[in-house]
Image (cartoon, grey):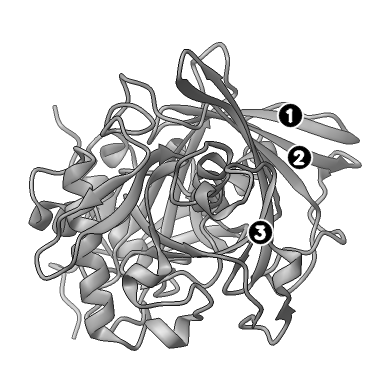
């Protein structure tokens, strides 16, 4: 049944991109209807409807989302007014079953797609051949990222032989530099170690005291030993995501750690208002296992095993910002991560995740007893999947006069 009271669909230009092991819908602000470009509430409603959230069925059948934390994402990219950056990059993690767009953190995987998108959309100049350097302002966390994007015959080189565990097909390598990835005193949550300690003991109702490293690097991250959760560190999604009691327990730990990091006033607020960050990760000594693809991972080929939760579920590989946090925590002695190494710290580090392995490094220096990290480096890949229009059956509010 049709009625004049129901709005027509609105066609909005968008690009659907894979970046690392994630996918998301990319827009420039100029793509959006003028009436929602600077209206935060209206923008959230538009993006929720474009993705297909909230969806009580958990499928995103009526939207562009993929109904996982890796595929329920949106990105805004625009020319930057900053002298030291080319584009501004704003990331939103869209909840699947709740009407929430969480703007609290970055997506390290989709960071790999920002440079290619900016070049393809004419937001930055690039050489016809060689490597384009795109300086990115990550607006969620106020940090700079430098993307090195391969070019061929005037276009982004998207195909290649770079293999990334968690991605089925090879593609061209994009090298990312996350500059000054640790938080500073002025950033959200305070310093890189917001409590001033590299090791904290969390007091969580119903739990024995939990030893953790609370760190702001890439995104705010909570590191615990796998054994503290009754796990080995070699788990795959099927071992964890069907265990509702374990997921509730891990979310409770994450929520209380969020309060300890100064990022929420209560555990309830942490769960309701910022499901995207901080992320809970668990680590253990290297051990052999079979990745989700069937590929064997040998203990001798890795320095540790690591797993991370994203939006309430175990991630199928490793978040890009989680990899940055691992690199930073591994490079600084006395953290839950670095104490796994005989030397007390290591960089670069290769870790095992559910889909395989990943190498990442961080440049850390100590001065007067304080550690700073100047850069974290890793390689990803990215590819355009679709460029066209997203149709959103949403009534856009009238412009304010």
In primary-sequence order, the first of circles 1 and 3 is 1
Observer-nearest of 2 and 111: 111
Q: Residue 396: tell me if it is visible.
A: no
Q: Nearer the viewer, mark 1 or mark 3?
A: 3
Identify the element where label 3 is drawn. Answer: loop
Residue 133 is labelled as: 1
Give the side of residue 174 with respect to residue 316, left or right: right
User: How packed is label 1: few (under 14 Cα within 10 Å), some, or many (20 or more)?
Assistant: some
User: How packed is label 2: few (under 14 Cα within 10 Å), some, or many (20 or more)?
Assistant: many
Give the side of residue 305 with respect to residue 272, left or right: right
Mark 3 — residue? 303
- Quadrant where the C terminus is found in the figure: top left
Identify the element where label 1 is drawn. Answer: strand
Give the side of residue 173 with respect to residue 229, left or right: right
Residue 149 is labelled as: 2
Q: Position of residue 89 (x, y in %)?
A: 48, 36
Observer-nearest of 213 and 255: 213
């Amino acid at each position: 049944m049709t009625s004049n009271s129901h709005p027509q669909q609105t066609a909005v230009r968008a690009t659907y991109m894979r970046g690392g092991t994630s996918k998301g819908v990319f827009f420039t602000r100029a793509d959006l209807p003028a009436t929602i470009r600077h209206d935060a509430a209206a923008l959230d409603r538009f993006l929720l409807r474009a993705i297909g959230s909230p969806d009580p069925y958990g499928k995103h059948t009526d939207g562009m989302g993929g109904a996982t934390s890796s595929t329920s994402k949106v990105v805004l990219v625009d020319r930057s007014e900053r002298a030291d950056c080319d584009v501004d990059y704003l990331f939103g993690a869209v909840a699947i079953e709740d009407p929430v767009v969480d703007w609290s953190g970055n997506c390290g995987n989709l960071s790999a797609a920002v440079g290619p998108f900016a070049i393809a959309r004419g937001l930055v100049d690039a050489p016809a051949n060689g490597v384009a350097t795109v300086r990115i302002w990550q607006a969620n966390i106020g940090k700079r990222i430098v993307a090195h994007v391969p070019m061929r015959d005037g276009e982004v080189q998207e195909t290649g032989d770079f293999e990334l565990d968690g991605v089925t097909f090879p593609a061209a390598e994009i090298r990312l530099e996350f500059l000054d990835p640790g938080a500073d005193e002025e950033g959200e949550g305070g310093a890189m170690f917001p409590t001033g300690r590299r090791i904290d003991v969390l007091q969580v109702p119903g739990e024995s005291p939990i030893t953790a490293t609370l760190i702001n690097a890439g995104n705010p991250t909570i590191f615990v030993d796998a054994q503290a959760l009754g796990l080995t560190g070699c788990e795959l999604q099927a071992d964890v995501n069907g265990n509702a009691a374990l997921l509730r327990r891990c979310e409770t730990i994450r929520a209380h750690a969020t309060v300890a990091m100064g990022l929420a006033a209560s555990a309830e607020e942490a769960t309701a208002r910022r499901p995207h960050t901080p992320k809970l990760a668990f680590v253990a000594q290297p051990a052999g296992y079979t990745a989700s693809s069937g590929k064997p991972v040998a203990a001798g080929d890795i320095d540790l095993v690591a797993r991370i939760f994203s939006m309430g579920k175990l991630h199928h590989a490793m978040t890009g910002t989680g990899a940055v946090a691992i690199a930073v925590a591994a490079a600084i002695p006395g953290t839950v991560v670095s104490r796994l190494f005989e030397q007390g710290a290591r960089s670069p580090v290769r870790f095992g995740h559910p889909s395989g392995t990943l190498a990442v490094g961080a440049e850390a220096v100590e001065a007067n007893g304080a550690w700073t990290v100047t850069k974290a480096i890793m390689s990803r890949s990215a590819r355009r999947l679709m460029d066209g229009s997203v149709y959103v059956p949403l009534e856009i509010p009238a412009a304010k006069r």
